[in-house]
Amino acid sequence: MEAIECIKTRRSVRRYTEEVISKQEIEEIIDVARMAPTWKNTQTLRYVIVQDKSIIDKIANDCLLGFEHNAKTMSQCNTLVVLTQINGRCGYEKDGSFTTSKGTGWEMFDAGIAAQTFCLAAHEKGIGSVIMGIFDDAKVAEAINLPEGQTVTALITIGKPKFAPDPTPRKEVSELVSFI
């Protein structure tokens, strides 16, 4: 699949078949996702793969801040990717100061790039995904025994799609761009 086709055809998938995504497939996706650019090549993103259904259900029931739509999606998946970051490196200088006015916000910028790259690589392999952002970081970290010094940045459910979702409307280029 060509890159532009991959970008234009990737959809958020919320319904999956029972087929389990193999360790090899996940590692191949992460091999691509690790190429996503990061602040000064800090490479602070990590991928925790959860295939233990009891942990997935715990996160779905206890960590999504009551957001039922995401809980339903998560309860139907058999593979959850917990995207994490190593704290205090991305966006920081060696003396602990920030180089940019974005402060710690740059960490989430890198996490977003990594999440999208992961989802595009998954799509190219016929694996659906949806990125979730409504969750309690600390509760998810506790549920997966995340090492100290890391923070959960996104939850990504993945699986073989039950069907291909229809594209959602997008704004026209003329609404999105201005030239100076």
Image: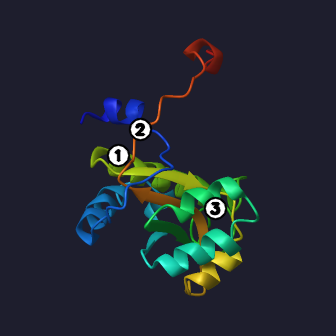
Q: Secondary structure at mark 1?
A: helix
Gap in angstroms between the C-alphas marked 1 and 3:
22 Å
Disc 2 packing (10 Å; few <14; some 14–19; many ≥20): many
Q: Secondary structure at mark 3?
A: helix
Mark 2 or 3, which is nearer the eye? 3
Q: Amino acid at mark 1?
A: His
Task: Say above or below: 47 vs 5.
Answer: below
Camera-side mark, 1 or 3: 3
Among numbered discs 2 and 1, the one appearing first in the sequence: 2
Look at label 3 and name its amino acid: Ala
Q: Residue at x 66, y 53 (%)?
A: 69
Q: Label 1 belongs to which residue?
A: 123
Counting every numbered tag in the picture gives: 3
Q: Is residue 126 visible?
A: yes
Residue 41 is situated, as x and y percent measured from the top left of the image, at: 43, 61
CB-based contact (under 8 Å), mark 2 and mark 1: yes
**Residue situated furthest right in the rendering:** 66
Residue 87, by quadrant, is bottom right
Does residue 4 appear to the left or right of 173 in the view shown? left
Q: Which residue is mark 3?
A: 71
Residue 28 to residue 95: above or below: above
Frontmost residue, 14 versus 140: 14
Q: Is residue 86 in view from this perspective?
A: no
Residue for badge 2: 10
